[in-house]
Image (spheres, rainbow, N blue to C red):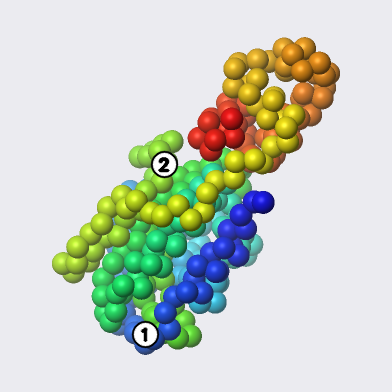
Amino acid sequence: MQLNIFDELRQIWKDIPKDHKLRDLTFDIKLHKKLLEIFQVGSYYYFVVNVRRSTFEVVSQEIETVLGYPLCDIDLPFYLSKIHPSDIPIFLNFEAAVERFFKRLSGNKLFKYKIQYDYRIMKADGKYIRMLHQYVIVNHDADDVKTFAIATDISHLKDEVRPMLSFVGLEGEPSFYNVDVQNLFKPEKHIFTRREQQILHALGNGLSSSEISEVLNISKLTVDSHRKNMLRKANARSTTEIVKLAFENGWI
């Protein structure tokens, strides 16, 4: 069964403690935006997430330029649905690790860490780009936990590399880079039917549709139909990409 990233994320966030009543009085979204325009290494957008309510409270206009979707269409479930399928379990493992990390902190130390990880997200034109996702907590109480997040396109800096999680200490706090997180959410291994797995193995061995039809004793039209279904299931754009994903995720 495929992971529902929004539902799984809400379950993780439900475990956030409610015994804090804190607000980062130094946070100013206008000041942060000015700093972003000076120091960002790529195109970016930002948003404020109300974690307890599982909603976006603010989404910057720049998201339309970077991803191509109309701002009015973008809510948290929509945004999460565009994350690359192979990165979804990694994303959820990261958020589970973040929830455990912050459980060990108290008081103003909650505001002294920046969370940083990356993932691939699909643009409106169907292409994937790699985003560096960074956020800090700006409010933490029983009713609301709010984070200010910045997503920067780092496709030109990091390509085809496994996402990494870091806890960056601020104001003298220790940092933890490239953290090895617990593998609570595992990639799906059996998204294809038995016949599709046979075709995937053949594609991995470099066979064409005509050659596969002869080996499996089925028509080329049937092979092509299976290949289209496989691309759709894997959310892949080409045979090369689907074979690569298959090796990465243990499908073959």
Is residue 104 something that shows in the picture?
yes
Count numbered badges in the picture.
Answer: 2
Percent position (x, y) of residue 115?
Answer: 34, 61
- Residue toward you, 132 or 249: 249
Is residue 245 something that shows in the picture?
no
Residue identified by numbered label 2 = 162
**Which three-letter amino acid code belongs to the residue tagged 2?**
Arg
Instruction: Classify residue 5 by image quadrant.
Output: bottom right
Residue identified by numbered label 1 = 20
Residue 248 located left or right of residue 116: right
Percent position (x, y) of residue 189?
Answer: 60, 41
Percent position (x, y) of residue 245?
Answer: 55, 34
Percent position (x, y) of residue 196?
Answer: 72, 30
How crowded pointer 1 is (Cα within 10 Å; few <14, some 14-19, many 20+) is rated as some
Instruction: Classify residue 204 by image quadrant.
Output: top right
Element under disc 1:
loop
Labelled disc at residue 65? none
**Which of disc 2 and disc 1 is earlier in sequence?**
1
Real-space Cα separation, disc 1 to disc 2, in angstroms: 34 Å
Relative to 233, say whether 115 is above or below. Answer: below
Relative to 235, say whether 137 is above or below. Answer: below
